[in-house]
Image (cartoon, rainbow, N blue to C red):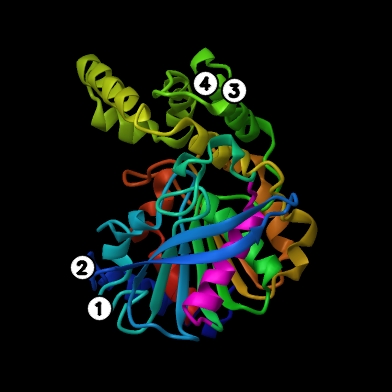
Amino acid sequence: MLTLPAALRLLAALLTAALCSAAEFPAAVEGDFSIRNFKFHNGESIGELKLHYYTVGKPSATNAVLVMHGTGGSGKGFLSQGFGGELFGEGQPLDASKYFIIMPDAIGHGGSSKPSDGMKTHFPKYCYHDMVRADYQLLTEKLGVKHLRLVMGTSMGAMHSWVWGEMYPDMMDALMPLASAPVEIAGRNRLLRDMIMHAITSDPDYRGGNYDHPIHGLQAAQDGLSMMTSSALQMHKQYPTRAKADEGYEKLMHTAMDKDANDMLYQFASSTDYNPEPELEKIKARLIAVNSADDEVNPPELGILERTITRVKRGRYVLIPTGPETRGHGTHSVAKLWKQYVVELLN
């Protein structure tokens, strides 16, 4: 049961978030940071690792917020009205006039170094710890950040949030993983990733990563990904007839062919050794883990968060019920559904 002060703080957070609707926010600034001779967890190294990033707000050494994207995404995705428009504007939970918001492209993604830049399968095999350590260097060496008010992320970025809390427990005040679980990726989640990787590598045109045109294995990879990360309700709204559903599928397959097979393969392989569960007690920051009930990637019936959150000293777990505006796994990017918890953490 909440104490009266805690209940009042929560009420204030709810009211504040409710009053903040989508709004304009300052334009993002883009930049690049190069790390010389970056060494990966497996002993491999690269002469120059480039990290691309976006920032909103004035630089600050101690009032910074780190926001990390999901698998296959980019920091640019957070500049949408559904995310940044709900969080970064004047009077909103992450008001850019008060906070320095940093949104990196993770290793292997967006404008950061990745296999498709030319190295193909000679690019080092990276993992989540490599990605977090590179982001740490970006923040501390390039952007001058000494302390973070909040570390948050969606999907893969949420998993990175757990890793951040363990690798750098004194670096942040608060953590907010959105759509994740702090355990190794197993069961159906791992099978999905195996299916995606197999769809790519088993395509005869893949040629060990030396393909010279988009391979059809990308479409097979997209099939499973679409089913697991979507919302049945939202897809039925979007495709209410057979004809519209067929048309939507054709567009989806066309989009899948725009991806790079090696980049996608590396992105999903990078989660292989993720498992923050053994060291959850290392997390010192306040933490609110937010998932949604219609997320097939992190289905609530597994009871993972209820079991593990008790080991996070200052942690709690929030499950958003399925509703007309949830988006399955994609609920992590519908900020109006969970932004009150950002307010709660920052208060």
The residue sitting at 57% across, 50% down in the picture is: 180
Q: Residues within 10 Å of mark 4 (few under 14, many from 20)?
A: many
Taking the magenta stretch, the answer to whether it contains residue 140 is: yes
User: The N terminus is located in which quarter?
Assistant: bottom right
Compare residues 185 and 268 and report the one nearer the observer: 268
Label 1 near label 2: C-beta < 8 Å? yes
Residue 10 seen in the current view: no
Q: Which mark is residue 23?
A: 2
Magenta residues, as a range? 126-145
Q: Earlier in the sequence, mark 1 or mark 3?
A: 1
Image position, residue 120 (x, y; %): 53, 36
1 vs 3, front mark = 3
Q: Residues within 10 Å of mark 2 (few under 14, many from 20)?
A: some
Question: How far, Cα to Cα, is label 2 from label 3?
Answer: 43 Å
Image position, residue 32 (x, y; %): 41, 65
Specify the amino acid type for callout 1: Glu
The residue sitting at 60% across, 39% down in the picture is: 122
4 vs 2, front mark = 4
Q: Earlier in the sequence, mark 2 or mark 3?
A: 2
Compare residues 296 and 206 and report the one nearer the observer: 206
Residue bearing the label numbered 4:
206
Q: In the picture provided, is 65 more to the left or to the right than 277?
A: left
Specify the amino acid type for callout 3: His
The residue sitting at 32% across, 43% down in the picture is: 324
Image position, residue 112 (x, y; %): 45, 54
Specify the amino acid type for callout 2: Ala
Q: Secondary structure at mark 2?
A: loop
Question: How far, Cα to Cα, is label 4 from label 3?
Answer: 11 Å
Residue bearing the label numbered 3:
198
Question: How far, Cα to Cα, is label 4 from label 1?
Answer: 48 Å
Q: Secondary structure at mark 3?
A: helix
Compare residues 174 and 122 and report the one nearer the observer: 122
